[in-house]
Image (spheres, rainbow, N blue to C red):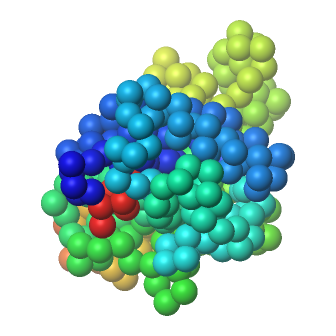
Amino acid sequence: MSGAQRPALGIDLGGTAIKAGVVTHDGRIIGRGERATEVEKGVGGVVANLALAARDAMANAGIASSEIAGAGIGAPGICNPRDGVVVNAVNLFWHEVPVASLLKAELGLRVLLDNDANCAALGEQWCGAAKGSDHAFMVTLGTGVGGGLILNGKIYGGFSGWAGEFGHIPAVENGPHCNCGQHGCLETVASATAIAAAARTAIDSGWSPALARMATAQEGRVDARLVITAARAGDEPAREILAEAGRHLGRVLAGLVTALNPELIVVGGGASHAGDFLLEPCRQVVREKTMPGPGGVVRIVRAALGNDGGLIGAASLAWR
């Protein structure tokens, strides 16, 4: 098969987990691998886990590396796609890490790199909720908050690669401390991590006995998934936690909608599973705080590819 026809490896590098998949040229995942990121092991340990996840995916697909067109990595933080370098990733504590060349040495494959939210945007544009859209944003609500901008059909990286860092747009004056060193960034109030922190506060203050009971049932573990489950079961504090995260997101998106006039905003990541508990308050704020022109045409929807968007989009780097 030609390079354009051969499957590619897509790798989604997260703060807690690495997910790899062998992806066909029509967007199907035919083999998967997953490993813990283990940030505490340093760059060498993370790269070793990237290679293990990739090899697991190829083994599960029954495909040798010689049959792979190449590999793409979606990494958090600021990336230099041209050189394959993660310039700055606060959640990985990485600075100027040439991860593409390091993984190439491990796998013997051509490896390309882009920001994880950019990869998720590419995946959704290729075969997901933004399919066919040339003017779309991607927002990922996970450990942090990522963003990808598709303008005129292409990923927009900005002058020096920093475009799309939605998570570090100020959202709350004098708000919580962020890993980037600032206070009140969007990811401190709207990420899955922030939702979990709000739930712990609700439990400690006695505001939500339901969340407290559910946390006890899972040995004290509190995460965004717990809040979503409680909201679906009718717990008002849980619903308010999700709504408040949605309102914070809406206030940041409103400015972007006015400035850039997108057709579509796709929301993904773990917290997006909250659906309209989070998205409807977000939509309402965007409607209230934008001009009728751009605010009246933009649609805010949940990602169609779920947790696979970044992986699929990363694989597409090998064919671009």
Asked if residue 298 can be seen in this view, the reply is no
| Residue extending furthest toward the front | 66
Image spot of residue 47 (x, y percent): 68, 50
Q: Quadrant of the C terminus?
A: bottom left
Give the tally of numbered discs.
0
Where, by quadrant of the figure, is residue 2 drawn?
bottom left
| Residue extending furthest toward the top | 217
Asked if residue 31 can be seen in this view, the reply is yes
Image spot of residue 256 (x, y percent): 41, 74
Relative vertical location of residue 276 with respect to residue 10 in this rendering, above or below: above
Image spot of residue 194 (x, y percent): 67, 47
Judged left or right of residue 192, residue 308 is: left
| Residue extending furthest toward the left | 132
Residue at image coords 57%, 29%: 225
Where, by quadrant of the figure, is residue 133 drawn?
bottom left
Judged left or right of residue 280, residue 220 is: right
Residue at image coords 46%, 61%: 110
Viewer-proximal residue, 230 or 132?
A: 132
Where, by quadrant of the figure, is residue 307 drawn?
top left
Residue at image coords 77%, 37%: 201
Relative vertical location of residue 30 with respect to residue 167 in this rendering, above or below: above
Residue at image coords 71%, 10%: 217
Image spot of residue 249 (x, y percent): 50, 58
Judged left or right of residue 197, residue 300 is: left
Relative vertical location of residue 234 with respect to residue 167 in this rendering, above or below: above
